[in-house]
Amino acid sequence: MITEVARQLDCKPDAVVTSVGGGGLFNGVVQGMRQVGWDDVPVVAMETVGADAFNASIKAGDLVTLPAITSIAKSLGSLIISPTTLDYYKQGKPPILSQLVHDREAVSACLKLAEDHRFLVEPACGASLAAVYSDVVAALSNSGQLPAKINSVLVIVCGGAIVSTEALEQWKKDFSL
């Protein structure tokens, strides 16, 4: 995926945003970034609270097994991450910024994407989208963790197998959006 994006872009993005579950997609993104010479581009690794094995593992400095997935983002949820995922974080190339959002923010981002682009995704993807719709990227930029001037952000939009207009409407009601 990253090699194809690199072929289509004139320059490197200022940041790459992706959801993290068990690490499969994330690991592929990191490997692709290394292959195309983007190992200096920060990765914003997004998870929802309750499906946050990566964030918990970073805090512990070792693999952590969650007792359960309590987030609505079930397809994002993995009780434990791949050891490679934590190794990539520790290596620091590319730099990785682990961020958490609540289910409400992920669902809100799903609804905004549907409104803005007529594209349905599930909350696992909404976690990534929340990085831009909920100003996570702006906050990271303001704090100096990302460049002060952001020109482009590559957001990996993944997942929509369990989503429908009915599901979105239900989540909208569930979270009073």
Image: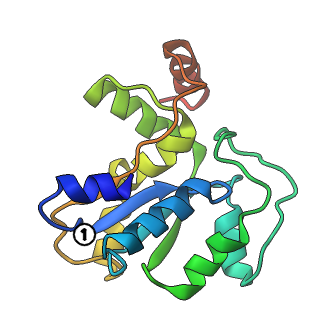
Q: Residue furthest left?
A: 10
Q: Label 1 neighbourhood size at 10 Å, few (<14), some (14-19), many (20+)?
A: some
Q: Please name whichever residue, 153 or 36, is drawn nearer the observer in this view of the structure.
A: 36
Left or right of 111, for residue 169: right
Q: Residue at x 58, y 57 (%)?
A: 20
Q: Amino acid at mark 1?
A: Asp
Label 1 sits on a secondary structure element that is loop
Q: Residue at x 51, y 60 (%)?
A: 28
Q: Where residue 33 sits: x, y (%)?
A: 38, 69
Q: Where residue 150 sits: x, y (%)?
A: 19, 67
Q: Residue furthest top?
A: 166
Q: Please name whichever residue, 102 or 156, is drawn nearer the observer in this view of the structure.
A: 156
Q: Is residue 27 above or below residue 42?
A: above
Q: Where residue 15 sits: x, y (%)?
A: 31, 67
Q: Where residue 155 sits: x, y (%)?
A: 35, 52
**Residue that mark 1 sits on:** 14
Q: Is residue 48 above or below residue 122?
A: below
Left or right of 158, for residue 59: right
Left or right of 131, for residue 175: right
